[in-house]
Amino acid sequence: MGRPYNFSAGPATMPEAVLQQAAAEMLDWHGSGMSVMEMSHRGAAFGEILERAEHDLRTLLAIPPHFRVLFSQGGALAHNAIVPLNLVGRRPARVMDFVVTGAWSQKSAQEAGRYGQTHVAASTADCGFTTLPDPASWRLSADASYVHLCSNETIHGVEFHTLPDLAALGSDAPLVIDFSSHVLSRPVDWTRVGLAFGGAQKNVGPAGLTLVVVREDLLGHALPICPSVFDYRTLAQAHSMANTPPTYAIYIAGLVFQWALAQREGELSGVAALQARNIVKAQRLYDAIDRSSLYVNEVDPACRSRMNVPFFLRGDDGQPLRDPAHPRNVAFLRGAQERGLLQLKGHKSVGGMRASLYNAMPMAGVEALVDYLRDFERQA
Ligand SMILES: *Cc1c(COP(=O)(O)O)cnc(C)c1O
């Protein structure tokens, strides 16, 4: 009787080995006689944990030296405000460009509007966020302080498989990405990014902890109303200790980083190994959906997310059953639960189903889901 497979979009499944290690070290971290939770954030032991976590994250994502790594708090939604508070003042016009490709980038644009002028450079709202806009069609402002996009839309299941080259599109603004729901699932092209931020609760660790990776030259432009502990320059100068950092969450994230570094797939290791595995996992599920006549995923195959797979069951008329209360949807979720396949209900704004396949979801979990899809279809 193993653990059930948890397909939640977040907080999400964790590597079991990390949970085991945290349990073993709960009362006594490395002979210190203390739990990490009880340690001073200024002490040598926690200093070691923080330093190693940053070092390992830099290794995993090949973060160049001219980027700073910040362990912040508040979740990605707090940083929807904190990013503009830090960056919009870079240029007098206080304009921010947004590429709106789903619920999360839409939320980011709304929040940023409180701190400057937002401009929607492109949007896929008209097609229900089922594809990505061609960068050649983006209407970028001449004087934007930055350009924002969400590189993986957790709710709508669309993912940027390559990041745009803003310079080639005639913009000299830095690119800001919300990479909450696919960080560590694939490498990041830092030549195209000025700032990346993400909540931890998908691929990294406990909710609340928020990663920010920012190019050094973007620091130092915070508006006077920016809370001091969220001024990225202050946070960078204080090595993420402008105030007490979320120490236990950083410790758990550090264990996840060690786990990620140890992953192997043939010749590959670390994020490259995880990426290879994620490609296979996602392909397996999308193939099963595409080949069936009961299930449907409506996202353009070129921009389907490897992490979040929204799908619908069809009704007898062949139409997608969006209403979660439809008896076929209810039966599907009940049967899944009985097999230990948890949290498959879609986001309330989209309906239907969603399976999140983060790094910690093993191939066996995907196989169990695919088996269930087949069995349910047979008896439907
Ligand atoms: C989960 C998620 C968020 C929200 O994070 P909070 O920690 O709840 O603030 C924001 N953006 C994306 C892309 C997400 O997946």
Image (tube, grey):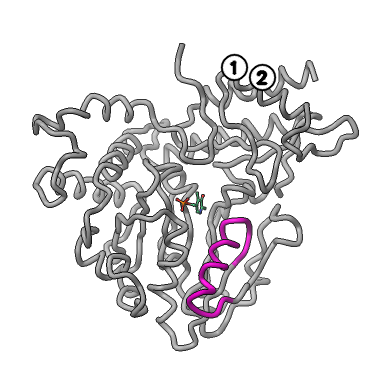
The reply to whether residue 172 is visible in this rendering is: no
* Residue range (magenta): 99-118
Please report the residue visible at 61 percent of the width from the left and 56 percent of the height from the top.
103
Outermost residue on the top side: it is: 1
Tag 1's secondary structure? loop
Is residue 355 shown left or right of residue 25?
Answer: right
Residue 103 belongs to magenta span: yes
In the image, is residue 278 above or below residue 95?
above
Please report the residue visible at 63 percent of the width from the left and 43 percent of the height from the top.
347
Identify the disc placed on residue 339.
1
Residue kind at label 2, given as amino acid type:
Gly
- In the depicted view, which residue is nearer to us: 160 or 353? 353
Q: Label 1 near label 2: C-beta < 8 Å?
A: yes
In the image, is residue 110 above or below residue 351?
below
The part of the image, by quadrant, that contains residue 252 is: top left
Identify the disc placed on residue 335.
2
Please report the residue visible at 26 percent of the width from the left and 64 percent of the height from the top.
235
Crowd class of label 1 (few under 14; some 14 to 19; many from 20; radius 10 Å): some
Q: Position of residue 316 (x, y in %)?
A: 88, 30
The part of the image, by quadrant, that contains residue 211 is: bottom left
Residue 232 belongs to magenta span: no
Residue kind at label 1, given as amino acid type:
Arg
